[in-house]
Amino acid sequence: MFFVRKRSANAAAATRCFLCESVVLTQRQQHDVGHSVIATGRGVLRLSSSISAGVQTPAERSEKGNKERFEHYMKHVTIMGVPFLHSNQQEFVDLLVNRIEHEEKTFVITANPEVVMQANESPTVMNYLKQATYICADGIGVVKAAQILGDPLPERVTGYDTMVRLLEVGNKKRFKIYLLGAQNETLEKTIKNINQTYPNVDIVGYHDGFFDWNKNDIANEIAASKPDLVFVALGVPRQEKWITENLDQFSKGVFMGVGGSFDVIAGTVKRAPVIWQKLNLEWLYRLLRQPSRFGRMLVLPRFALKVFALKIKGQGAPK
Ligand code: UDP
């Protein structure tokens, strides 16, 4: 279970834990009632605390129990019915690492404007989003929309960056991972590059993304190998559908749709240079490199129009 809330970093005012009200003094400390606290800086102090597995009852550890408490304590920004987690990239990775360490099953969707539009046009896709533990703003369009609608999000939290940072942490903590998706050749290169760059990450299994959905062997393999992280690279919304349909079969692990991230790690697709990312033009870079995405990109102006229509009607992001 996690609690995250902002507090002003006023040196004079002590920052207290929400659970036990003890003062947070250090970067990371264990509190005596079985939860830990993480404090991060730069003007704002953010607390995350987690009841350790030992003190939770099975009911408390159930997905539903966790979700209800999360929703109570964590801030979300809702855009067109999609509740985005109010978190920056590093805090989100910290949150996932903590959940891995407490064996809390987690379903992550990193959603861009295309996903928001799909969800608004398809109840099936909206249902996938409803199953997610966290939905992150993967796209400058979502961050801009939140700003326009009057309830800003801190920054983009992308599937690719989350995956890479989790691999970095996984290399230190020897996480077990499973890779599902992409063409066979891409997957092989992804595995080779992960093995080279993160030698302590244990790849317990993998499967390409072109399989018979009626067979259950991939889910069985994952359930048996119990990875800490399952990266699903089938594209949107296929990856969210696969996770939604199979999540019940697993007892633990972070399950995350990562779109074309295997292609980038394999080196078959180049990610936009940092300058394009900083100028918020990653989408344009992708479009220029893969013109076949043009049809998909037509959703962006429709998304923008809808955001401005909501703004004009005074229907910003509900707080
Ligand atoms: N893919 C897959 N199975 C499929 C369709 C696609 O594994 O049935 C893979 C594809 O090879 C690519 C990734 O899914 O590696 C989709 O990447 P894309 O850039 O389209 O992701 P998105 O933009 O949807 O996040």
Image (spheres, helix red, strand yellow):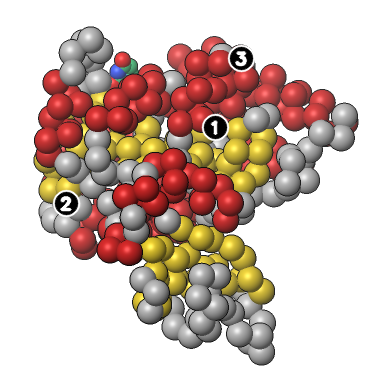
Pointer 1: residues within 10 angstroms few (<14), some, or many (20+)? Answer: many
Work out whether residue 190 can be spotted: no
**Residue under circle 1?**
112
Q: Amino acid at mark 2?
A: Val
**Which residue is labeled 2 in the image?**
201
Residue 22 appears anywhere in the view:
yes
Pick the residue in front: 273 or 258.
258
Could you tell me which residue is drawn at 66 percent across and 89 percent down?
12
Q: CA distance from mark 1 to mark 3?
A: 15 Å
Tell me the crowding category of disc 2: few under 14, some 14 to 19, or many 20 or more residues within 10 angstroms, Cα based: many
Q: Report which residue position mark 3 lands on.
A: 121
Compared across the picture, whether 114 is left or right of 316 comes to: left
Secondary structure state at the residue bearing disc 1: loop
Q: Residue 2: percent from the left, percent from the top?
A: 46, 58
Question: What is the x, y in percent for residue 49?
Answer: 45, 66
Q: Which of labels 1 and 3 is toward the front?
A: 3
Query: Tag 2 or tag 3, which sits nearer the N-term?
Result: 3
Instruction: Indicate yes or no: mark 1 CB to ligand 1 under 8 Å.
Output: yes
- Does any atom of ligand 1 lie closer than 8 Å to the CB of label 2? no
Q: Are marks 3 and 2 in contact (CB under 8 Å)?
A: no
